[in-house]
Structures are given as structure tokens and as C-alpha cells.
Amino acid sequence: MDLCKLFGEIIPEGTYSVREAARYLGVHRCTIYAYISHPERPLPFSRAEGNARRRFLGKDLMVFKKNSIPKKGRKRKSS
């Protein structure tokens, strides 16, 4: 699966894994888990019954990318 080609045209009705969501949003996998547990604007996800893996709807990822992603990068230490 060519993820670069896939995310040129994300499918709103499609579901995506944590890895695919991270690639689409341009962040690390660990950051996706931080977005999920954000107290004010959590990234919505679903789980199939009996399956621990998180899945994300394409439309949710598109809305989250448009509205909710904080600025990238770490804060610099002032010296």
C-alpha cells in the first residue's frame, strides 16, 4: 500500500489505523494517542467489538486536521 498516494485522496467513509492517521496528520504515532486523550478536543475513534485496535474515520481526520491540530515543534528553552 502506497500511503503517500493514499493520503493524496483520503476517503471520508474509509477507516484508518493509528499509523495511517499519524501519517495523514503529519505527526508521530505517540502524538495520536495524546490527541485521543486531549481533555477539550479529543480525536474521535472507534473500536470493533473484541478488537483493541483503534480506527479513525476519514471524515473525522479531515475535520481534525482542518480545525484542531496544534502548532508543530517543541518549545525552545530560553537561556
Image (cartoon, rainbow, N blue to C red):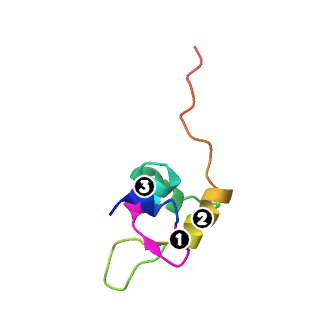
Give the number of the mark in front: 2 or 3.
3
Residue 36 position (above or below residue 70) = below
Query: Which residue is at 64% across, 65% downward?
Result: 63
Label 1 Cα crowd, 10 Å radius (few <14 / some 14-19 / many 20+) = some
Choose the circle earlier in sequence order: 3 or 1: 3
Q: What is the residue that sits farthest to the top in this orientation?
A: 79
Instruction: Give residue 18's quadrant in the image.
Output: bottom left
Q: Which portion, as a residue range, is magenta?
A: 10-20
Q: Where is residue 30 in the image (x, y as percent from the top left)?
A: 41, 51
- Residue 75 in view, yes or no: yes
Residues marked 2 and 3 touching at CB (< 8 Å): no
Identity, as a three-letter code, of the amino acid under mark 2:
Met
Callout 3: helix, strand or loop? helix
**Would you say residue 32 is visible in this rendering?**
no
Q: What residue type is labelled 3?
A: Cys
Depth order, front residue of 55/1: 1
Q: Which residue lies furthest to the bottom in this view?
A: 49
Residue at (36% x, 86% y) in the render: 49
Q: Mark 2 points at which residue?
A: 62
Q: Is residue 41 above or below residue 29?
A: below
Q: Which amino acid does label 1 sit on?
A: Gly
- The residue indicated by pointer 1 is 58
Helix, strand or loop under label 2: helix
Q: How crowded is mark 2: few (under 14 residues within 10 Å), some or many (20 or more)?
A: some
Please say if 34 is above or below 55. Answer: above
Residue 31 falls left or right of residue 70? left
CA separation in Å, label 3 and label 1: 15 Å
Which image quarter: residue 43? bottom right
SS for callout 1? helix
- Do callouts 1 and 2 mark residues in contact (Cβ within 8 Å)? yes
> Is residue 17 a member of the stretch shown in magenta?
yes
